[in-house]
Amino acid sequence: MTGETDLIKLYSGRILALAADIPHAERLQNAQASVKKRSPLCGSAVTVDLAMQGGKVSAFGQDVKACALGQAAASVVGGAIIGCTQAQALSARDQLRALLKGSGIVPDPPFDGFEVFLPASAYKNRHASILLSIEATCEAIEQIIGA
């Protein structure tokens, strides 16, 4: 029963609130890059559209068809990504991966909202869905700027 209780705790009120209010939840008409990522384990999918100007994200849109955790992560990304550089996005992705692997270290602002996923480190089967939006965002930036 403990495992089930812990899983219920993972879907906290904060996660559900983030999932219910995803910023930039519409596709961009004039995106410089579009990337779709899908989690084969659960079927969650996120499509990110992105534009950059002066080395920073100037426009962002996303279509999120994911579980509550994937939606919540997309909400954090959508609320933080405008104005970010490639280095900030890559750092956020790497810090979220480390957090999910159990580092316990909260990503730097403006992506510190990812701290809500601290309890998810125990649920490896949920990690791919949580990472969809930030990974798609980083890939889109790389397409625009070049790796």
Image (cartoon, helix red, strand yellow):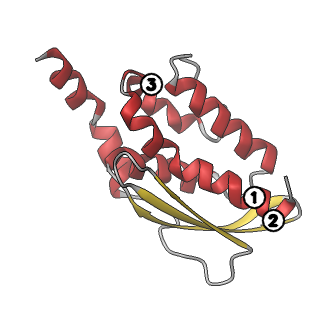
Alpha carbon separation for disc pair 1 and 2: 5 Å
Asked if the residues shown at circle 1 and circle 2 are in contact, with their CB atoms under 8 angstroms apart, the answer is yes
Query: Where 34 sits versus 115, above or below?
Result: below
C-beta proximity under 8 Å, tags 2 and 3: no
Is residue 144 found left or right of 18 in the rendered image? right
Q: Nearer the viewer, residue 34 or 82?
A: 34
In the image, residue 47 above or below residue 133: below
Q: CA distance from mark 3 to mark 1?
A: 26 Å
Label 2 belongs to which residue?
Answer: 144
Q: Label 1: few (<14), some or many (≥20) within 10 Å?
A: many
N-term-proximal mark, 3 vs 1: 3
Percent position of residue 75, x then y: 47, 52
Is residue 84 depicted above or below 59 in this figure?
A: above
Q: Which mark is residue 141?
A: 1
How crowded pointer 2 is (Cα within 10 Å; few <14, some 14-19, many 20+) is rated as: some
Can you say which quadrant of the picture contains the N terminus?
top left
What secondary structure is marked by label 2?
helix
Residue 118 disc label: 3
**Label 2 sits on what residue type?**
Ile
Q: What's the residue type where badge 1 is placed?
A: Ile
